[in-house]
Image (cartoon, rainbow, N blue to C red):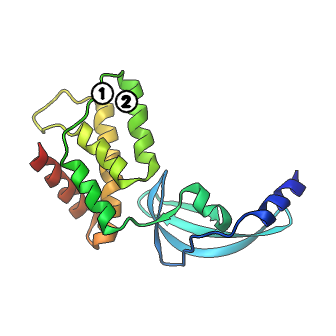
Amino acid sequence: MSQNLSQTSVSAPANDIEFAAGDYVVYPAHGVGFVEGIETQSIGGMEISLYTIVFEKDRMRLKIPVKKAQSSGLRKLSSETRLKDALETLQGKARIKRAMWSRRAQEYETKINSGDPVAIAEVLRDLRRPKEDTEQSYSERQIYQSALERLAREVAVVESITEQQAAEQLEKVLIKAA
């Protein structure tokens, strides 16, 4: 089995994405992280280069093989154009599907974990309720909050503002659209 692993890693195509220590990146399942550094470890007799990514908010450190960065979905921060598309999505009309909540919740979680700012904005738009509306369930509020935090982290880093300011900015866009 280790023979197959070594053949796979030798024949793997070169990685198109290059990150350096100090870069902010987005890992789909965890959101915005900070590349702490690149290290080489010996695993099973093979030398493997790994990105060490720190997610301060979650107090988590993740190591991803450099050759697997692209296939894992690791990407650079969104461009201002992509974030503008996400803000436009927030201003759209909510699309509530008639499917059972468990199915919709699963779809929302998938969109959040995709790391795509427009998909996350769709979740925010679809789950947004006025403060006086008490019909939102606990799980709806949890998913909404998760989406808001994920998108706010990326907006905050791109626009060089705090996460709190970014969340307030996103909520203002949602309130205007309502």
Answer whether labels 1 and 2 touch (C-beta < 8 Å).
yes
Residue 166, quarter of the rendered image? bottom left
Q: Quadrant of the C terminus?
A: top left
Q: Which mark is residue 97?
A: 1
Residue 35, position as x, y percentages in the image: 52, 72
Q: Which mark is residue 48?
A: none
Image position of 136 (left or right of 68): left
Image position of 6 (left or right of 151): right
Residue 38, position as x, y percentages in the image: 62, 75
Residue at horizontal 67%, vertical 65%?
A: 67
Q: Find numbered disc 1 in the image and state the secondary structure of the residue it sits on.
A: loop
Q: Amino acid at mark 2?
A: Arg
Give the residue furthest to the bottom: 21
Give the answer, above or below, for where 23 lies relative to 58.
Answer: below
Foreground residue among 19 and 54: 19
- Could you give the CA–CA distance between mark 1 and mark 2, rounded to whole angstroms? 8 Å
Give the answer, above or below, for where 129 lies relative to 78.
Answer: above
Q: Check disc 2 and report the residue beneath it.
A: 104
Q: Amino acid at mark 1?
A: Lys
Residue at horizontal 14%, vertical 54%?
A: 172
Give the answer, above or below, for where 103 lies relative to 82.
Answer: above
Image position of 156 (left or right of 61): left
Image position of 113 (left or right of 155): right
Residue 155, position as x, y percentages in the image: 30, 63
Please report whichever mark, 1 or 2, sits nearer to the chain's N-terminal start: 1
Is residue 63 something that shows in the picture?
A: no
